[in-house]
Structures are given as C-alpha cells and as structure tokens.
Image (cartoon, rainbow, N blue to C red):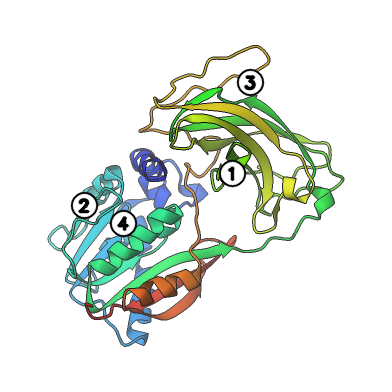
Amino acid sequence: MALDRLKSTWENLGRVDPRWAVLTDPARRHGGWDTDEFLATAAGPVQRVRDLAEAAGLTLGDRALDFGCGAGRLSNGLAAHVDTVVGVDIAQSMVDEAVRINRFPDRVSFTAYDGQRLPFDDESFDSVVSLISIQHSPPAVQLACLVELHRVTKPGGVLVLQMPARPNKPTELTPDAMRAHIEPLGAPRSVGAGQSVAVHAKVTNTSSTVWPAGQLIRLGNHWLRDGEPVRWNDGRTDIPHDLAPGSSVEMQVPAAAPDEPGQYVLELDLVQEAVSWFAEAGGTSVRMPVEVVSAPVVVAAPAAETPVAAPEESPAEPPAQGRDDGGMEMFGVDPTLVRLLFAHCGSDVVEAVPDDMAGSEWESYTYVIRRGATL
C-alpha cells in the first residue's frame, strides 16, 4: 500500500541517515552532516517563508506547525520567529532524531503521526509550514495531507507549502530513439497483495541514438489484469549513465503489487518522463505473469526458464532497490488542483511562487494560503 511504503521508506531513512535524507548532499552521506551546520541551513528557507507571509499581509503568529519535520531542521529555525513550534512526521525514527538534536526543548516539540489524521484539534495553529516534504507522498496521501493541514490552521492563519507541479520537460528523444530490449533477470512468480519487490532486468539500447543520463529516462513498470492497467504510477529507476547504441545496463525497479489478490501481468517498459513510454512510441516492453496472493511472499520459488525472484526484505526496512536516493519518490501536484482544493475549503491561494526546492528536474512552487473563516 502507498502509505505503508511511504512510512517504511522514511522509517528506514531515519534509522540509517536521517540528516542526509532531509538534505541529500552526496558529500554528506553516511553521517556527514555536523549538527550545528545542519540546523543552520534552515535560516534561509525560514526567512523566505516569513517574507512570503508578510508580503501577503500575514504573519506566522505564536504557534506554528512544521509538517514533515524530518530531523527538525526547519522546526529549530522557526523558533527564531515563533513562540511555539510543533514538528510532525510520519516516521518515528525521524522524530527521535529531531528530539535528540532539538536546540529549543522548552518551545519546540515533536510527534509522529499515522499518515492519515493529524493528532491536533481543529484550528490549533496560527501557521503551517511544509517544505521539501509533501513532494514525497503519493497523490492520494498528498490530498489527505492538504485537507488535514487546512483543518488544523486557524481562520485568518497562513499555510506556506512547497510542492512540485510536474517534471520539467527534458530534451525529447525521437520515437526512433525509443527502442530497447528488456531482459528480466529476477522477477517474482508470486507476491503478496500490496507487497513491494525489486525486479531486476538487463536493458539494452537497440536504437542508433545515445540515451543521455539526466534526461528522465527511466525503467518503470505497470500492473495489468485482463489486458487492462490496474496500477500505472509505480516505481521508477533512472538509467545510471549515458547509454550508447548497443550498450546494456543491469537495473532494478521497485514494483508494488496490487491490493487485490489474483492473476496479473507485470509489464516492464522504459519511459522518458513528460514525453512518452517507449512502447507507446513504437518500442517493445516485456510482460510477465505474476500471481498476487493474500499473504506476503518471503521468497518466490524459482522454476525452469523463469527468472528467479530477489529475496524479500523485512517490510520495515525496504531495500534501496538499486537507487542512490534511499528509496525516496517524487510526486507533483497540479497548481490548478491546489487552488481548487483550497477554494473548496473556503480559503485563498494568495501567491504561488516558483522555487528550486524540488531540484532542476521539477517545476515547483511555494504556495501562500490564507485560511478562510470556518464555514
């Protein structure tokens, strides 16, 4: 399930490398962030939040919520401007780190929540801040987050929320360049409902064009049943480097099984995000039958001429699955949807300011929202 996968990913990141998971500087991986230096990086973003609110005629007030607080970086930064700060996160391991390095324990507190309903009364905060957090939640979870953040903000209060909208469109491959051979190296014959597995494959560029790294060319998957897609927006893995014609690379992609048991087809295909799936451009994908069962599968049984399944890890500590981001995923929210959602709740999106917080691959905005009166 999307929420379970999100929680497991961040619990694991919080145990292994919590500060790097918040600020993914490659040079600071494996405990490379000094505590004071890490906390000091909040000063700029927090000042920007304050400036945006004040430009809209709003203030952070006396009591602020830091949503998706992680290791408490912004929460400590907000303490310079707000009397009381509460940080909340889906991962208890992140909250534990935030508590451990908290510089203002008399005014800043932290709590974990279940990813569904925030443990706070209606209209209990003057302001809500969330930066580089909502972007990691799957779409359905994102919408629930926004409704909850609106619920806990006081009428007249302000929400300052950063969310990417969509991937920046890369330099497009031509349809002729979208030609590949995908050879499964490890795929499950059966998997538990909602369970995530790492699917291994050898990908060969069979076109006459170099596939450049950094252009959103990724191995992805779909789940089909009776020829119809039942899960499309699943895991992705970037090609690790430029791939010349005729060259191959071994990759693995996370695949989260559908929630309902039954007979399915798992399809692997390449995609250039915001352009096209290779199969839709005339390329060839690969499909494998998979039985989805009610109970989790620890190790899929191998069979003759059938790829051998990779062993499953404990659900609490999912493998990095060949990625260098610890399993973090990115999801955009359409700006029109943001405006319509808050308008429906009786509030106003005062400003949507472009930002670079989601990285160069994404179009991203920081929204300033004035909470309307209770209806």
- Upstream in sequence: badge 4 or badge 3: 4
* Separation of marks 4 and 3 at Cα, in angstroms: 41 Å
Identified at 21% across, 52% down, the residue is 111
Sooner in the amino-acid sequence: mark 4 or mark 2: 4
> Residues under labels 1 and 3: Cα distance?
23 Å
Mark 3: secondary structure: loop
Q: Residue at x 37, y 45 (%)?
A: 3
The amino acid beneath tag 1 is Pro
Of residue 346 and residue 187, the one placed in the foreground of this image is 346
Q: Nearer the viewer, mark 2 or mark 1?
A: 1
Q: Which mark is residue 229?
A: 1
Task: Report the mark closest to the observer, 1 or 4.
Answer: 1
Cβ atoms at labels 1 and 3 below 8 Å apart: no
Which amino acid, mark 2? Thr
Check disc 3 and give the amino acid type: Pro
Q: Which residue is mark 3?
A: 307
Report x, y in % for residue 264: 56, 32
Residue tagged by mark 4? 69
Which quadrant holds residue 363? bottom right
How many other residues sit within 10 Å of disc 2, few (<14), some (14-19) or many (≥20)? some
The residue identified by callout 2 is 111
| Sequence-first tag of 2 and 3 | 2
- Disc 2 and disc 3: Cα gap in Å? 44 Å
Assess whether mark 3 and mark 2 are in contact (beta carbons under 8 angstroms).
no
Q: Which residue extends farthest top?
A: 304
Q: Secondary structure at mark 2?
A: strand
Q: Nearer the viewer, residue 161 or 106?
A: 161
Distance between the Cα atoms at labels 1 and 4? 35 Å
Evaluate if marks 2 and 1 touch, with contact meaning CB atoms under 8 Å apart.
Answer: no
